[in-house]
Image (tube, rainbow, N blue to C red):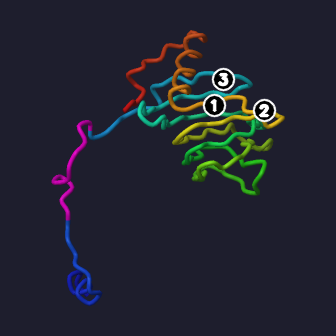
Amino acid sequence: MAESELAKNLGVELYTVNPANLPQTPLGAVHANAELLPWVEIGIGIQFKVLSCCNKTGRYVILTKYPPGTQLPPHRHSGQVFGYTIQGKWGYVEHDFTATAGSIVHETANSHHTLKVHDDSPVELIFLALVEGNLITYDEQGNIWAIDDGQTQLEAYLRMAKEQGIEVDESLIARW
């Protein structure tokens, strides 16, 4: 059945849109190349790279690396998080699932969890995350230990790189 005949039978009107005719943002696209940015050590073998940061919203994209057995402090995000596992094996202490290479995770806004890289992960965890809103980290007693967003993550990345003698070409970090 032809597309127009199908549309007629379903009682819908088909139309096409040429993407070139749609309104364009002044920039059109933002680009970052993770391979050109250096890893920066946070501590206990954890490393990270801030790939992009939005000055208006605090949204950021971060690439993190964790050794097997790493457990982060409990935390929550005020906004949603979309994550992609590049390699490794991990989950949340509070939930019964295991993410492996290729796993996509969506954390809903205000979800609370404790990331744990499996002790038997054959490789370190490399995880890419698009984070919206604040990251609120808690201590063992449940008190707020830190509140971060894209701007504070970017500042920490650049400061730690400088302290470690690592040069970061800031023009490679996408900002909008």
Residue drawn at x 71%, y 22% is 43
Q: Is residue 143 left or right of residue 152?
A: right
Residue depicted at x 55% and y 11%: 162
Amino acid found under the numbered disc labelled 2: Asp
Q: Work out whether mark 2 precedes mark 1 in sequence or the reverse, and give the earlier one.
A: 2
Q: Residue furthest front?
A: 143
Residue 127 appears left or right of 75: left
Q: Is residue 105 visible?
A: no
Extreme left residue here?
Answer: 21
Helix, strand or loop at disc 3? strand
Question: Measuring 36% from the left and 35% from the top, which residue is drawn there?
Answer: 31
Which residue bears the numbered disc 2? 139
Q: Residues within 10 Å of mark 2 (few under 14, many from 20)?
A: few
Q: Is residue 24 magenta?
A: yes
Q: Which residue is mark 3?
A: 42
Dot 1 corresponds to which residue? 147
